[in-house]
Image (cartoon, helix red, strand yellow):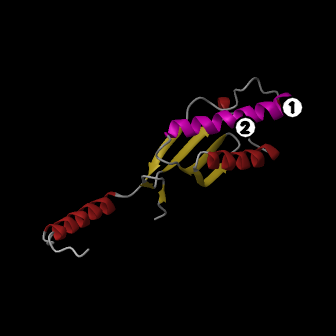
Amino acid sequence: MDYKSLSHSTWECKYHVVFSSKYRTKRLYGSLRQELRDLFVKLSLQKGCRIEEGFLMPDHVHMLISIPPKYSVSHIVGFLKGKTALYVANKYARKRKYKGYHFWARGYFVSTIGYNEHAVKRYIQDQEKQNKASDYADLFTHTY
């Protein structure tokens, strides 16, 4: 397990995120593909996120991203899509005939990646055993 920690929490929150270009047009090709890859990594690190896996298809993006619990998934996806749309519009708008800042489609798909049910049940059972063991401990025999 690869747990990360903030000042008051330890976490592992991974999500499978997919979003597409506007009208599913095949816009992600050539040098833009490499630039977007680097930009996604740089932007995600700004928010404390980490892209574990990712692939840019000609018309959509797949990524497995680790997001700290202090940010919502919608905030991070909106941040990534917004900043990359601005970058593309400023750099390629005249060359590729893009109109305005409308590079990505409005929606996205997200799915959580987590433990299976068996592991969670086993963890809860182990916690119960540890709690019962601590109930029998003598509270008045501390050595300071």
Q: Say which residue appears at 75% left-offset and 35% top-offset.
A: 87
Q: Say which residue appears at 51% left-offset and 40% top-offset.
A: 73
Q: Is residue 57 above or below residue 11?
A: above
Identify the element where label 1 is drawn: helix
Q: Is residue 119 above or below residue 136?
A: above
Q: Residue furthest right?
A: 95
Which residue is denoted by mark 2 in the rendering? 26
On the question of residue 20 being in view, the answer is no
Instruction: Give the number of callouts.
Output: 2
In x, y percent, where is residue 41?
A: 67, 50
Give the position of the C terminus as an image quadrant: bottom left
**Structural crowding at the residue carrying mark 1, measured as other residues with C-alpha within 10 Å and reported as few (<14), some (14–19) or many (≥20):** few
In the image, taking residue 21 as reference, residue 141 lies left or right, namely left
Task: Indicate which label's residue lies in the foreground, 2 or 1.
Answer: 1
Q: Amino acid at mark 1?
A: Lys
Identify the element where label 2 is drawn: loop
In the image, taking residue 40 as reference, residue 106 lies left or right, namely left
Q: Residue furthest front?
A: 144
In the image, taking residue 9 as reference, residue 29 lies left or right, namely right
Residue 26 location, quadrant = top right
**Structural crowding at the residue carrying mark 2, measured as other residues with C-alpha within 10 Å and reported as few (<14), some (14–19) or many (≥20):** few
Which residue is denoted by mark 1 in the rendering? 95
In x, y percent, where is residue 19?
A: 60, 38
